[in-house]
Amino acid sequence: MNTNSIKLFVLAAETLNISAAGQQLGLAPSVASAWLSKLEMEVGADLFHRTTRKVTLSIEGTEFLPYAKEILAQQEAAFAALGRGNPDVSGTLRFAASSTFAQHYVVPILAEFLARYPKINVELMLSDTQVKLIEGGYDLALRNLAAEDSSLIGRRLASDTRVLCASPEYLAAKGTPQAPEDLIEHQLLVFMKAKSRKLIASNGKRECTFPPASAKPRVVCDDGASIRIAAKAGVGICMSSIWNIRNDLKDGTLVRVLPEYHVDDQSSVWLVYPKSNVLTAKVRVFIDYLVEKIGKPPVWEQ
């Protein structure tokens, strides 16, 4: 069975115009009609009802359509797998990611990726505010949650451990919290529209949330890099990912707060893409590259 004929069938089923579908594949109307007739002979059923005025899908054509799309998807997935390491992979990749994460870990490694794949161009949409993947026409996005939307597929890239932290200067001036309830008396920096996260003591006997339900954050911000800078400047206590503050913890400009508590949400960094999109070679090689450079194990845990 010729997959080009199947592609023609899918296009014709979507447009209900055999000539127009054939034009998209560079076929003359007579050739497109002949291809579909041959496909109908192979499957043993009329896939379309044709009249001089219009073309409609038959019952058999409607039943065959999802299987035809799956055949094409599997073909593209196979080609994508073969594209790994192939420098001739081409196209423009539209990638959406947290600006804070991308500045730390994606942008610095772009040069090597572009050198490996000289025919791929990259469009970066960088914002700590989550974008709509499908509506925005993005091929791939990086998020800190698994794909909750059934129209998306997710692949885990790396762990995303989060901790409470503040500057030594702030703690010296305001005091160091000894228990979760002490947080209510402190200035808290919170990411905009962030859900409260559960913290559990290492002995498992106590738990709390950040921010506490009764606390009113002193600063709310939609940019992770700015929250980090504010915390280092002594504005207050924040929750941040280790990947964002690992160097600050190392040099002592930020220190852990309530270190005996851990965030109990098993957060991870995820790569997500639309389920409706075939995983093309350009997306496949970029995912593989990010996993190679960032996630085995995560750079911030090495």
Image: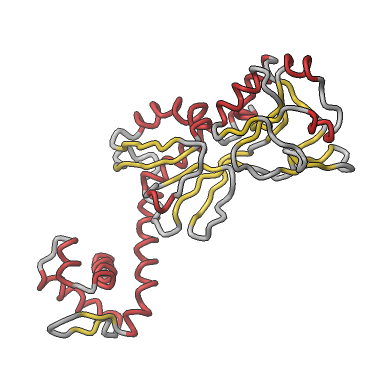
- Taking the spot 39% from the left edge, 66% from the top edge, the residue there is 70
Q: Is residue 30 above or below residue 156?
A: below
Q: Where is residue 147 in the image (x, y as percent from the top left)?
A: 55, 52
Q: Where is residue 239 in the image (x, y as percent from the top left)?
A: 68, 32
Q: Quadrant of the C terminus?
A: top right
Asked whether, in this view, residue 29 is left or right of residue 133, the answer is: left
- Taking the spot 42% from the left edge, 46% from the top edge, the residue there is 284
Q: Where is residue 63 in the image (x, y as percent from the top left)?
A: 38, 80
Residue placed most toward the observer, 133 or 167: 167
Asked whether, in this view, residue 242 is left or right of residue 284, the answer is: right
Q: Position of residue 197 (x, y in %)?
A: 71, 43
Q: Is residue 299 above or below residue 147?
A: above
- Residue 286 falls in image quadrant: top left
Residue placed most toward the observer, 99 or 25: 99
- Taking the spot 40% from the left edge, 45% from the top edge, the residue there is 283
Q: In this view, does 83 lie above or below 71?
A: above
Q: In which quarter of the image is the N terminus?
A: bottom left
Asked whether, in this view, residue 267 is left or right of residue 19, the answer is: right
Total numbered circles: 0
- Residue 41 falls in image quadrant: bottom left
